[in-house]
Amino acid sequence: MKNIIENEVGAILTDILDDYKKGRAVDKMDIYNQPDKTEIMDILDRLFSIVYPGFFRDKTHKIYNIEHSVSTMIEDVMFHLNKQICVVLKYTKEFGDNEEEKLEQFAQKATVSFMRRIPKVREYLETDLQAAYDGDPAARSKDEIVFSYPGLYAITVYRLAHELFLLGVPLIPRMMTEQAHSKTGIDIHPGATIGKYFFIDHGTGIVIGETTIIGCHVKLYQGVTLGALSTKGGQKLRDVRCHPTIGDNVTIYSGASILGGKTVIEEGVVIGGNSFITQSIKKGTKVSVRNQELIYHSGDESLHHKEQDESWFYII
């Protein structure tokens, strides 16, 4: 019997190689000058071990000695991060035309500056951990939150990526936060500005846009969007403030959307579930969507249900 597949391999190969010659945006033939996603994820894993010492052990060490282990991890992170920054600098229009020596110098300075910011990142994360513990009665311990809460994981990745973003490192911060997005369903752009004591409860479906500003002691539930009113302008909107400002001590319940660069949610506001907000909200306001009328069908009768008292909403 004639093997159809075997006979067609050569023709298929020719077709695909010919297509590669068309210069499509999806083609990156110089694989050695592209960022290594696997290596960047390994860097992220080691950063977690540095940020949360003792929680995430490196299995290559038979005996855990904190000074030796952390020293080894720091050297490893700095070596690989420096290498990846050099690669992404060449890859971007902003830095691509610079001399090799200048790229290397920028990469080294960015790497050192980033690692020196780790204590600051840990300071913020300690407040985020406290906010999660204080805000979730289901949490039995802070260890439980570090080991298992997707919200804290996504926030940790964001806080690390944000420091790289502030240092002007291209691409890598976004690769990090998108990894957290794929793992947790929580999408936080590394360019967003987020204060201390930030708590994400449940988290799935949360979106926080690039120019969002969030104050301290803010709590978000699943499905919240802090986004732009419109992205029709495409690349013309780059570096334009498109996302909302959220003040201190704000709680935003599940499914709420707050959109627009001119939208300011002032201190102490509570936003109810499924609210759609495109205008600023004054300090201390409580916003809720009027309950839909519920109809219960029981046999031949349809019973209309009265709207419930919403006072419970404000005390959670």
Image (cartoon, rainbow, N blue to C red):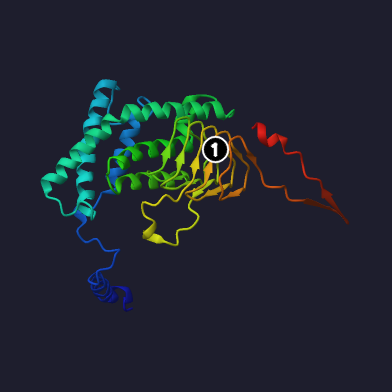
Residue picked out by circle 1:
266
Tally of marks: 1
Please state, as top left, top right, bottom left or bottom right, where the C terminus lies in the image: top right
User: Residue drawn at (58%, 39%), measured in percent from left and top?
Assistant: 282
Please state which amino acid type lies under the numbered disc 1: Glu
Question: Could one spot residue 139 in this view of the protein?
Answer: no
Q: Is residue 14 above or below residue 279?
A: below
Q: Residue at x 43, y 26 (%)?
A: 126
Q: Position of residue 163 (x, y in %)?
A: 32, 37
Choose between 9 and 113: the one closer to the eye.
Answer: 113
Label 1 SS: loop
Residue 123 location (% of width, % of height): 38, 26
Tell me which residue sits at (22%, 54%) in the image: 91
172 w.r.t. 23: above or below = above
Q: Position of residue 53 (x, y in %)?
A: 35, 25
* Residue 122 in which image quadrant: top left
Relative side of 238 to 282, left or right: left
Residue 304 placement, left or right of 227 = right
The residue lying at 23 percent from left, 44 percent from top is 85
Could you say which is closer to the camera, residue 131 or residue 281? Answer: 281
Q: Is residue 141 left or right of residue 100?
A: right
| Residue 130 visible somewhere in the drawing | yes
Indicate left or right for 262 with 52 as reference.
right
In the rendered image of this protein, does residue 137 appear above or below residue 92?
above
Examine the image and state in which quarter residue 49 appears: top left
